[in-house]
Amino acid sequence: MTRITLLFALGLVLFSCKNNTKDNESRSPSSKLFEQLKVVEGNGVLFGHQDDLAYGVNWAYQEDRSDVKETAGDYPALFGWELGGIELGRQVNLDSVPFDKMREYVIKGYEMGAVITFSWHPFSALDNTRSSWDTDQQVVKHIIPGGSHHDIFKQHLDKVAAFFHSLKTKNGNPVPFIFRPWHEMDGDWFWWGNSHCTSDEFKTLFRFTVEYLKTEKGVDFLTAYSPDNRFSSEEEYLTWYPGDDVVEIIGVDNYGDFRVGSENVEAAQKKLEIVVEYARKTNKIAAFTETGLNMVTDDQWFTQKLAKSFLESEVASEIAYVMLWRNDDTTHFFSAYPEHSSAPDFRKFTDHEKIWLLDDWNSFKDSLNLKSEK
Ligand code: BMA
């Protein structure tokens, strides 16, 4: 980090403190997280990975392990976790991660200084044997207020809220996190997707979810809005946007523009620019909430494709974080692991001064006195 960017960041923090009427103690954990992420903008990009502490390629549930750490020398600065199954009261999520373990990893990750984010691929409240990918029923209109299965949906949210409330540090402090429900709604692979509900029904679902969890259940979190890559203008991007009052993280998921054969890194960059520009306008945080190339079939993918999609654009490089999807097994992984042929390129990517793993992120916070309460 250069002196100039550091001074600039410090200026921003002082500015935001001066403009914040509440003192440090009375602000919620999520608003502190917001402030930390806001300062990242333009200085660096946090690197994140889904399920990183739970398992990787060829290992599972072994203490302190992480494919990212074992490949690049440090843990990610952001950890993603998946809640699918919690709404049915299950003990393990849809990828077999026990929720008790997940809670431990979330708390551990936060105590190490990392940012936490949750995705949620719930089963349908109309029929709990149907997953998020079963699109043959019109679920959304039946679970929003006034719908036939609204009460069951609320019970699902109660289970989500109970899990969120259980995320407390040893000292009893709640762990702040980013919740990213109903993502990739511009695609049609989830029952909340484009062709399975109207954009108004979608907005109602999104807004109800956030307001119910926050107001009725008292959960404190930041919310991410993350379409997939099927937009080419701000107007299209905002088709399903529920409103500035219920969203803090302006996100995008994008695998499509990196698919070998039909790859278009420039298009990916343009979409990130749309996201950053909207976040700038509304004083929110921009993020590349999910991406990757399954099985990293291009050994130079991290430096030649992923990095180029944001680091080569002054605007796009203002995203606060980028998160890769999970490393399940040798046929389904998105980050490198030590024995994989993309590992040297991954190290080069994470060595870039603007790509921040956990230590980089912690040093940045230290330098600005932006530590969280543990
Ligand atoms: C998908 C795949 C699935 C997984 C789901 C939810 O992208 O990784 O294997 O079940 O996400 O985590």
Image (cartoon, grey):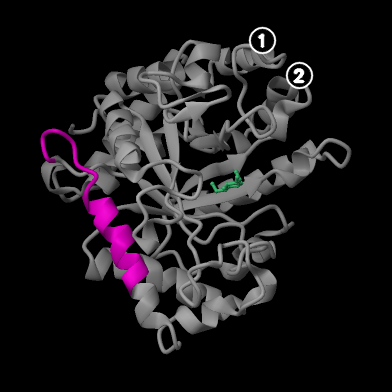
User: Residue 246: image x %, image y %?
Assistant: 40, 64
Magenta residues (range): 155-172
Query: At 28% across and 47% down in the image, what residue appears?
Result: 30
Q: Quadrant of residue 169?
A: top left
Taking depth in this image into account, of 272 and 16 the one nearest to the observer is 272
- Magenta stretch mostly in which secondary structure? helix
Q: Residues within 10 Å of mark 1 (few under 14, many from 20)?
A: some
Residue 203 on the magenta segment = no
**On the image, which quarter does residue 38 sit in?**
top left
Amino acid type, label 1:
Pro
Q: Amino acid at mark 2?
A: Asp
Q: Position of residue 95 (x, y in %)?
A: 51, 44
Q: Is residue 220 visible?
A: no
Question: Label 1, on which residue?
Answer: 344
Q: Is residue 360 left or right of residue 165?
A: right
Cβ of mark 1 under 8 A from ligand 1? no
Q: Residue at x 66, y 63 (%)?
A: 186
Name which residue lies at 56% across and 35% down: 326
Above or below, comparing residue 141 to residue 94 in the picture: below
**Which residue matches tag 2?**
299
Quarter of image, res 106: top left
Left or right of 371? Residue 352 is right
Q: Nearer the viewer, residue 359 or 336?
A: 336
Residue 369 visible at all: yes
N-terminal label among 2 and 1: 2
**Residue 190 x %, y %:** 62, 63
Name above or below for residue 307 compared with residue 74. Answer: below
